[in-house]
Image (cartoon, grey):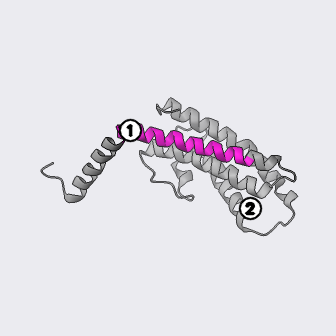
Amino acid sequence: MSKANKKTLGLFAEGINLHGATARTLVDLQHQACADRILLAKTFLHSGNRLMRVRPPEYRSAISRYYYSMYHAIRAVAYFNEGGDDKESHSMLPSAVPSDFADSAIWQNELKDARSRRNEADYDPYPINPLDWRGVARDLQGKAPTLLVLAETYLKKKGCGHL
């Protein structure tokens, strides 16, 4: 303590306050954050599925929801693996898929592709015909739940205490 600078002492004080306010350890709160992000990923997955069931299906919006399910699933994994939320940007997150994650290189590419498709669906006016988006939406409808299961399994295996 006697050699800590002002910034370090401020961080210590913040940690003490956090522990006092929650009566939980930092590690426990980190594990809870991972579990909560998985829950958010599940929420986006369910939203995507609902959008696929409405008549007519809302393919563009479903693509977006499936991407965000994938994004939050990998963000939970990256947060746990990195020990912090250092790779939350959409462009950096694929590189944070751990090498010991199942088929990590494949999922890095799938996440990049899903983001690209989400950007097209959200921002590009073409193609205008909603049916032209059906194939992409169905593809992500299959990939998002698979990735979510892999992420949850990975976190459990690594010792995430709230899953």
The foreground one among 93 and 7 is 7
Residue depicted at x 47% and y 34%: 160
Image spot of residue 142 (x, y percent): 74, 42
Q: Is residue 152 rendered to the left or right of residue 121? A: left
Q: Nearer the viewer, mark 2 or mark 1?
A: 1
Residue 57, numbered circle: none
Marks 2 and 1 in Cβ contact (< 8 Å)? no
Image spot of residue 70 (x, y percent): 63, 47
Instruction: Residue type at mark 2: give it.
Output: Ala
**Secondary structure at numbered mark 1:** helix
Q: Earlier in the sequence, mark 2 or mark 1?
A: 1
Q: How many marks?
A: 2
Image spot of residue 114 (x, y percent): 68, 53
Residue depicted at x 68% and y 62%: 119
Residue 23 shown in magenta: yes
**Secondary structure at numbered mark 2:** helix
Instruction: Residue type at mark 1: give it.
Output: Val
Residue 102 can be seen, yes or no? no
Displayed quadrant of residue 150: top right
Displayed quadrant of residue 146: top right
Residue 27, numbered circle: 1
Residue depicted at x 68% and y 45%: 45
Residue 45 can be seen, yes or no? yes
Residue 140 shown in magenta: no
Question: For mark 2, what is the residue?
Answer: 121
Image spot of residue 20 (x, y percent): 30, 42
Q: Is 76 situated above or below 128?
A: above
Q: Is 73 situated above or below 150?
A: below
| Residue range corresponding to the magenta coloring | 22-48
Marks 2 and 1 sit apart, C-alpha to C-alpha, by: 38 Å
